Amino acid sequence: MYIKPYGDTLNDGAVQLSFSMPVTCSGRAKEAARQLVLKMGFAQCDIVHAHPLSDEFTFFVAYAKTAASIDFDRVEYVEALDEKSLSMDEVNAFIKAEFKRKLVVVGACTGFDAHTVGIDAIMNMKGYNHHFGLERYPMIEAFNLGAQVPNEKLVERARELRADAVLISQVVTQKDTHVQNLTRLIELAEADGLHSHCLMIVGGPRIGNKLARELGFDAGFGSGTYAEDVATFIVKKLKERQTAGPRRQQ
Amino acid sequence: MKAKLGLSKAKISQARRRAAGIAGPVREHIRRHTTVAVERATLRLLGADGANRDGVPVPNLVLEALRGRVGEGLSKHYISALLREGKSPVELNAALAEGFDIAQVPLLDQGRVAAKAAELVRELEARLRANITHRDARLKEFSPNAKSPMLYVIVATGNIHEDVKQARAAALQGADIVAVIRTTAQSLLDYVPYGATTEGFGGTYATQENFRIMRAALDEVSQSQRRYIRLVNYCSGLCMPEIAAMGALERLDMMLNDSMYGILFRDINMYRTFVDQNFSRMINAAADIVINTGEDNYLTTSDAVEKAHTVLASQFINERFALDAGMQPRLMGLGHAFEMDPAIKNGFLLELAQAQMAREIFPEHPLKYMPPTKFMTGDVFKGLAMNVLFNFASKATGQSIHLLGMLTEAIHTPHLQDRYLAIQNALYVMNSMADFADEVEFKRGGLIKRRAQQVLDESLTLLAEVERLGLFTAIAQGLFAEVKRPQDGGKGFDGVCEKAPGYWNPVEDWLECRLKIAG
């Protein structure tokens, strides 16, 4: 099934855009913005608003129509979780039944990242948006190491605490700094042998499962993730590992 | 602003007494200690600057050479070297950067050292006075164009020259305050990098050169716009006092500076932080720099409904530490934030109660109000709506420093047009309700009054508990922001040093005298 953006009629291809350009606001600037949108491949474009941001910058709001469409049936995407998440109680019951011990989860914002909003939402007792955090789970021992934890320290603490899973939050993604940091971390975890028995999971607003897997992590969770989503992945994956035997170093 | 909440004056006084009781024992610790950062800041204020070929700053070179003598104060060595070598600070800095070993310079007699120190301190005083005079003159000249609250934006490109373009654009659009975001990495560096930053991650370094570049740009746009545009940077982390020194020298107008933030959110050692924050606040006070405290951060980790009283308690504590550092209330930009879950029924009324309460309890303080961040999603349109309510709450309760919410919060550092949209939003809301605060009173026994009284009561209970435990233990037990920090843990503990009997610091002596701090 081919689909296009929907404005007010099926397949009208309506898209709203806004952007700034480094030119003085003028009729010519507006025309340049319109032509630029057409160059992007849009079939039709109206610049509905233009306003100077300074003497050298102009802001535009544009409505455009695209001829492009996508065959929805052929879009492939693998979610970190291929089924519905368990509830907090179900996670606890699952751990009791399958592991017969508490699972240890260690979380941190690593490298230079100081933004703890994400890791707190997943780990803190209170959780986020009425979804309790992992600290609230009776069968999970959760250790939130906080912000700016050096990668070395995180690996060391995870080993000491005999972690079953490590959660890394990365919020700052400017200039792909998170990719470099995550790459260093996964290299450390591999060298240390930690990753052979411990899940490495990364989360953040600009993090997807695809990127995380490419970097060598077990899963990646983006915005809109709650503690039970992460917990479900952890228990299911650990169970799978348990059944399949220890993961061999690749 | 007229008091509308009917808060008990006796309870407010009691809270202040408890804050004093909490700060007292910490004050004793502060008095008996110096830190590597305090010594480096002192050297900077006496003229130490520059860096060697490897980028090690001159104040750090002096410290490394004299590591074992921190407890006696490092200034006497620097001043002895100036005198013995017959050099100016600029010349001595150059020599130090080339490898001149200051440890080999014998100390001169204290009389000569003190006389030279007095001369250097007079130069320092003159420079700070010139900065204050300049700022006051511009503020007076441009006062017809001043806004209340002042609109505060951030620039965060990581390239100071790119930051300048964005700051200029924001100022033209109506921003009154520009904060140059500092790369988060800097808070844990035990030195201040040297020179201009052109490739930072998530911000630039706070360097003296970056301060100069942005100051010059904002002064230019201040003239063209007939509004004095204030410059902000971060006086926090392991180099808190040094950054205060640089900010004082380069006429920054505001600095983020919190008495406990580094401990709770950066895992910096508490003994280190308390000494550093005191010295940095003395410098800020002497330079007439408004501090912005960080209470908003409590609400990004904790719930804004349940933990509102921790914000108020921390405001009382921050106020007390600032008073102890000789700072007047007009320089205390106590922080708070609009961080209620937007799904809560009447959440806006709770926000209004909190903001009004802060205004009434801290009437002379330029309160700093932070926008929604925690519940901002990728939905920029919902975000814009939330920022309208935030702008409304701020104007309705007479806040002073209004950090504009960005519709793209939670997505990226602000794009050029994000700031424009935020400024337009605030100008519209605040103009259309200009005299709202004066028109409206709150219902007796209503939700807003009850909420404010409840938060004050809860903060009194918390302050009593902290006073009973002692602040060091209270932090260790996680009473603030639900973060536990061990007393001897955290970064920078090895940089704390007990003052030896012969400790001497001419800048500290001058600051205490100038700020009338009882010795």
Image (spheres, coloured by chain):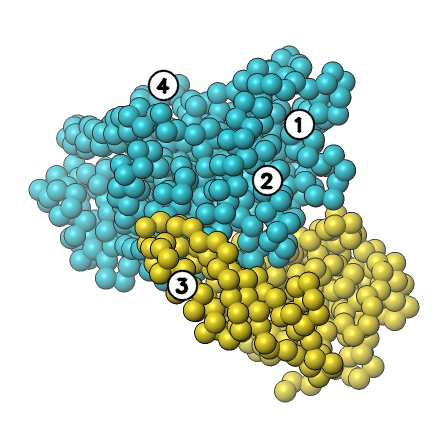
Chain colours: A yellow, B cyan
**Residue closer to the observer: B266 or A78:** A78
Q: Amino acid at mark 1?
A: Ala
**Residue occupying the point 66% across, 61% down:** A223
- Return the residue at label 2: B388
Q: Is residue B118 left or right of residue B414?
A: left
Structural crowding at the residue carrying mark 2, measured as other residues with C-alpha within 10 Å and reported as few (<14), some (14–19) or many (≥20): some
Which of disc 2 and disc 1 is earlier in sequence? 1
Q: Amino acid at mark 2?
A: Val
Are tags 4 and 2 found on a single chain?
Answer: yes
Labels 3 and 2 touching (C-beta < 8 A): no
Residue A107 can be seen, yes or no = yes
SS for callout 4: loop
- Return the residue at label 4: B516
Q: Amino acid at mark 3?
A: Glu
Mark 1 → mark 4, Cα distance in angstroms? 36 Å
Mark 3 → mark 2, Cα distance in angstroms? 32 Å
Q: Given the image, what chain letter belongs to the residue carrying mark 4?
A: B
**Residue occupying the point 23% across, 37% down:** B46
- Return the residue at label 1: B353
